[in-house]
Image (tube, coloured by chain):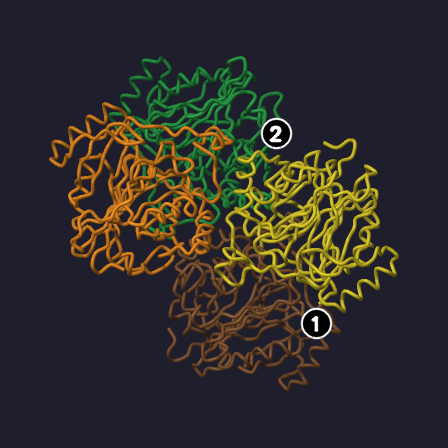
Chain colours: A yellow, B brown, C orange, D green
Amino acid sequence: MSDIAHLGHVELLTDKFDESLDFFTRVYGLKEAGRDGASAYLRAWDDYEFHTLKLTASDATGIGHIGYRATSEEALLRRVAAIVEMGCGVGWVEGDLGHGRAYQFRSPAGHLFEIYYDTKRYAPTQGDEPALKNTASKFTGAAPRRIDHLNLLAPDVEAIEAFMTAALGSKVTEKIVLSDGTLAGCWFTVNNKTYDLACTNDHTGVPARFHHVTYATDQREDILRAADIFLENGVHIETGPHKHAVQGTFFLYVWEPAGNRVELANSGARLILDPDWEPIVWTEEERKKGQAWGLKTIESFHTHGTPPAAKDH
Amino acid sequence: MSDIAHLGHVELLTDKFDESLDFFTRVYGLKEAGRDGASAYLRAWDDYEFHTLKLTASDATGIGHIGYRATSEEALLRRVAAIVEMGCGVGWVEGDLGHGRAYQFRSPAGHLFEIYYDTKRYAPTQGDEPALKNTASKFTGAAPRRIDHLNLLAPDVEAIEAFMTAALGSKVTEKIVLSDGTLAGCWFTVNNKTYDLACTNDHTGVPARFHHVTYATDQREDILRAADIFLENGVHIETGPHKHAVQGTFFLYVWEPAGNRVELANSGARLILDPDWEPIVWTEEERKKGQAWGLKTIESFHTHGTPPAAKDH
Amino acid sequence: MSDIAHLGHVELLTDKFDESLDFFTRVYGLKEAGRDGASAYLRAWDDYEFHTLKLTASDATGIGHIGYRATSEEALLRRVAAIVEMGCGVGWVEGDLGHGRAYQFRSPAGHLFEIYYDTKRYAPTQGDEPALKNTASKFTGAAPRRIDHLNLLAPDVEAIEAFMTAALGSKVTEKIVLSDGTLAGCWFTVNNKTYDLACTNDHTGVPARFHHVTYATDQREDILRAADIFLENGVHIETGPHKHAVQGTFFLYVWEPAGNRVELANSGARLILDPDWEPIVWTEEERKKGQAWGLKTIESFHTHGTPPAAKDH
Amino acid sequence: MSDIAHLGHVELLTDKFDESLDFFTRVYGLKEAGRDGASAYLRAWDDYEFHTLKLTASDATGIGHIGYRATSEEALLRRVAAIVEMGCGVGWVEGDLGHGRAYQFRSPAGHLFEIYYDTKRYAPTQGDEPALKNTASKFTGAAPRRIDHLNLLAPDVEAIEAFMTAALGSKVTEKIVLSDGTLAGCWFTVNNKTYDLACTNDHTGVPARFHHVTYATDQREDILRAADIFLENGVHIETGPHKHAVQGTFFLYVWEPAGNRVELANSGARLILDPDWEPIVWTEEERKKGQAWGLKTIESFHTHGTPPAAKDH
C-alpha cells in the first residue's frame, strides 16, 4: 500500500455562505455533519469520514485547503519528511472537527494541502442509520455517494506534476501535451481510482485557483436526474451531461451560488489496476475533437475559476 | 502498494467446449484473444491483459486455476517466499499464451492458484482499435467491461481466510458469521475494489469447487439489458437481477452451457478507500432477510457448484 | 377518438390514514393537492388533473372507487346510455374536489366505477411551477411521473371482460387462459397505453377486492433507486424489481402501511399502436415459467388483496 | 378512435446505398425484412409491421415518401375524401412489399405522403422468434425498439399545420412562435404519443426537405450506449445526448453515411392523454435558452437537411 490512502476533503470558500449551504444540502444532496466558526462540514451519504467538504464563509471564493489521508501514522511521517525535504512545508496544525493533526504544505501554484492520518469516522445519528450496514449512512435519493476528485488551476502544470509525485507519491494516469510540448493538463491518483486530482493550466496570474470539486454517483442515470433537479432549482448548468474523452467519465458541471464550479461524475467500472500503467497522452489535435461524443468544450470551462480573474465570466 | 495488484484471470473447465465458447463470445460478450491446445483465451473489452478467462475443454467442469498479478518482480518473489514458508507451494510453471512464468500453489480446499508479474498486454488488432485511447479495445455493445471477482467453495472458510491473508496479503472486507460462530462466507480484496474473491462454505465433500466468476458492467442498465439477451438466447437465468445485501452489488447469475455459474455485476461508485476498514460482519439472522430488496436466496445458490456434487441441481 | 380518454383516478381506503399519507407523500413521492373531510387528494408531478389518488380514512382497506375521464361531454353521455342499458348504473354524483359531475356504476364483482368529463386541471402554486412548461408541476427527484393502471380482483374475470368492453369500450391487450379454459387474467386499455386496468381471479368470496395501483416512472433506474428508498424507510417490499412476462413491464411492488399494494412500473417505449391488435394469450404452462427473467411469482401475490380475506397474509 | 392510427413508415433516399444499409443494420440496429428493386425494407425489433424504413438507392438524399396507417378501411376512405376535397391528392398506388394499396398526396412543401390500411405484419423467421410473445421479434441488444417520429422542413409551417390537421386529423401538441408571430416549428400527433411528426421552417428554397427520422429506445441508457457505438464506428455525431426543452425528449442525432439525419430518442413515461390538450407555445426568447439543460443548439441543426441546399454543411 502506498503512503497516501485517498483524497480526504476539500475546503471551499464562499462569499454567499447561506446560498451555498442551501445549494449543497438541499439541491446537490450532501448532509451537514457539523459546524464551527465560519464553517459547515458536509459529507456525501457514503463518505466514511466526518466530512469531505468544508464550506467556509469568506470574502473570497475558491479553495481553502485540500486534505489527503495517509495510510498510517508511519506513512504520514514518511510523507512529511519528504515534503520538508522538498522545501514546501508549512507546518503542523491541530486539525478541525473532522480529523486530528495534519501537516500543511503548498503546491508550486500556491494551493494549500494537508495530510493527516488520525480521522473522525462518521457515526450515524438517530434517523440516519443505514438500512444496509455496509454503507455509512442513510441513502438519500438522488444524492452523490462519495467525494471523487478535484481540479486545480496552475500556471505551470509540470511543476504540479513534480510536486504531486514527490509530495504524495501520486501516479499520473492521463495527460494533455500541446504541440509545443507544454503539459496542459495532468490527472493524478494515489490509489486504484482513475484520478483524484487534476491540474490544468491557467494564465490569469491569479495564484492557487480552483477549477472544480466532484462527487461520484452510482449510475449515469443519477446524473441525468440531477440535471433536472438543477434545472428545477435554477442552478446554473455550465455544460453536460456528456462523456469526457480524457478518463471517459460521464459528467455534469454546475456553478454553486458563489460561483465555485461543482461536478457530478460517474466512471462506470473503470479503475486503474495495472501496476505498470503508462500515462495516456492526449495531443492538442485530439483535444480539438471535443468531448467523447463530440461536444465542443465551452469557453467558460477554459476561463472561469475561483477566485475569478479579471477576464472571468 | 501491496505485493499483489489484482485478480488476473480464471481458468474454467468445460465438458461442452463449443457451447461454452459460443456462450462466452456471442452471448456474454467476451472476445477471443487466442487459442492453444484445448484452451481458448478470452477477455472483456477493457481488460488490459491478453486474457482474463481461459476456457479449457475437459471431461469435468469447475475451475482450472486462478491467477493474480503481482505489482513487480520483487513483490512476486516476496510472495513466493511467503507461500513456500506456508508449505502450500506447488512450483513454477512457464506460463501460457497470456503471461510469463508463474508460481503455483494450492488453497486448503485444493483450488490451484498462481501468481505472476510478467504479463502480455492486449494489443488491439486491426478493426479492434478503440475510439478512445484510454480503453483497451473497441467497446462492444452490451458487453461486460472487465473481470471483477470469483467465488470459491470450501469446507473450511476460516482456513481460506488465513490462506488468502497470508499468501496474497488480501484484506477481508465483509464476512458472514453464523450463530454458532462458523465463518460461512468471506470477501477478500488486494486493492480498492470491494472484493476480488469470495469464499462460501460447502459440505459436499467435493474438493476445490467453484461457485462463480464475475465480470463488471459500467451500469446497472447493462445488466437489465443482458437479462433480455440471456432470455432471448435460452440461457438459464438462475437469479436476479437484484441487489446483494452483502457488498451492495447489483447482480445477475446465469449458468453457461456446461453448468459453470457466471455473474454480471455492478458496484456503482463503491470502493474501499479507508486504510483501516473493519470487516462488516453479517449475522445469520440478518442473512435470513434475503437480499437487499427482500429477494429470498434460491436453493440452488446454496447447492449448485462445479464440478457438481451428488445432490447438485 | 374513443369515448373514454384515460384512467383518471383511484380512491384508496386506509385504516391507517396518517401512516398511509406519510408513505404516499414523503416516501412514494406523490404531492398533496388538497383535502376535504376524510380524504387527501394526491397526484404525481406530471399528472395534469388535480388528483389521481384520493386517499380516504376508513375502517377498511381496498378501493373506494375508480374514475375514468371521457373525451367529451357527448362521449360521456354515450357511455352513460350504454351503461344504463347494461343495467349496472348507480347514478350521477356531484363530483369532488378534483372534478365535476360523474356517473357511477358497478362492475360484476362489485367495484364502484365512475366516468366524468368536467375536470379540474392542476394549477401549480407558488414554488411548484415547473422549469419546463410542458410539464404539469415541478419535477421532484425520484418520484413517479403519472398514474398508470390499477389491478382489480374478481371471481369471474370473463364477466369483467364483458363489462369493461361494454361499459368503457376498453380493448383487451393480453390475457391468461388456463388449461381448463378459465380466463385467469385480463389486461385492458382505452388508449395507446398497453393497459390501464388489469383483472385477475380471486376465490376468496370477498367482493370488490383490490390488487394494486401503479404509477409510471420515466426510467427503470428510477425503480431501482426507489427500491433503496423503500428499504431505507422500512417499507415492505413484496417482490421485484423484475420484468413481467405479461406486458413486459419492469416492476416493483410494496405494501403501503395499511396493506394496500402499490406498484412502480416502467414500460419502456412499448405502446399498442396497431388498430387491429389481437390479444396475446398466455397459457397456464407459460405462466409457470415465472416472470420474464425467471423470478417465481411469490405466493402472497396470489393471495393478498385489500380488503384482506381470512387466508390473507 | 381517430381515422389515422399511427405513423407507419418513412422512405429515405440515399446516394450511398451500401454504406447507408450497413449503418442502419450493423450500427443503428434495424433489421432487414426484405428487398426489391432499389430498396431495402427495414424495421426495429418491436415494430409490428413488415417495415418502418424503406431505404432506396437514388442519386439524391432526403425523403421519398411518408406512410401513415389508417384505423380501418372506412377510416382510410374518409381521409381520402377529405384529402381530395383539399385538392392535394395524387392518387392510389398498389403499395409495395410492406403493405397494400395506398393513397398518395402532397404537403404544401411538396413532401409525398400516403395513407393505407391493408398492411403486412411482420412474421418472425426461424431464429428471429422472440422469447416473449408480446414482442414482435427477437430483442437485439442496444437496438431501437420502434419507429417514433420524423421531422420535415417547410418554408411555411402554418401551411403544414393546416395540412396535417385537415389531411390526417393530427393534433398540435407543442409549437414555437417567434416574436414577429411566425410559426417556426410545430409538433403533431394522431394518437397518445407526444408527437409523430414535427415541421420546422426552412428558407433554402429547396422543396420537400427532410430534417430527421427517429426511432424510440426503451431507456435513456440505451442512447448513452448508442453514443459509444456510434463513436466506435466512426459515425458523425451531430449533437447530444441531451434533453429537448420542447417535448422533453432525451435525444441523440447522427448523420448516416449519405447525410440524412437520424435520431434516437426516449420520452420516458410522457404521453398526451388529455383529450383537451392545449398546445404548449414556446416563445423566441425561451428558445434562446437552448435545450433543457442549457446546451446551445448547434448551427448545423438549423441549416443541414436533405437534400442539401447550397449553404448546407
Q: The N terminus of chain C appears in which quarter of the rendering? A: top left
Q: Residues within 10 Å of mark 2 (few under 14, many from 20)?
A: few
Residue position marked by numbered label 1 in the rendering: B3
Q: Chain of mark 1?
A: B
Report the front residue among C290 and C34. Answer: C34
Report the front residue among C145 and C33. Answer: C33
Q: Residues within 10 Å of mark 1 (few under 14, many from 20)?
A: many
Q: Name the secondary structure under disc 2.
A: loop
Report the front residue among D110 and D220. Answer: D220
Residue type indicated by callout 1 = Asp
Q: Please report the residue visible at 38 percent of the width from the left and 15 percent of the height from the top.
A: D88
Examine the image and state in which quarter residue D7 appears.
top left
Q: Is residue D228 left or right of residue A74?
A: left
Q: Is residue D223 left or right of residue A214?
A: left
- Relative to B34, say whether D41 is above or below: above
Report the front residue among D98 and D57. Answer: D98
Residue position marked by numbered label 2 in the rendering: D298
Examine the image and state in which quarter residue C77 appears.
top left
- Residue B128 visible in the picture: no
Q: Chain of mark 2?
A: D
Residue type indicated by callout 2 = Ile
Please provide percent x and percent y for residue B277: 62, 67
Please provide percent x and percent y for residue A220: 55, 47
Please provide percent x and percent y for residue B24: 50, 62
Q: Are marks 2 and 1 on the same chain?
A: no
Q: Please report the residue visible at 76 percent of the width from the left and 42 percent of the height from the top.
A: A284
Q: Name the secondary structure under disc 1.
A: loop
Please provide percent x and percent y for residue B32: 57, 61
Instruction: Tell me whether circle 2 and circle 1 mark residues in contact (CB < 8 Å).
Output: no
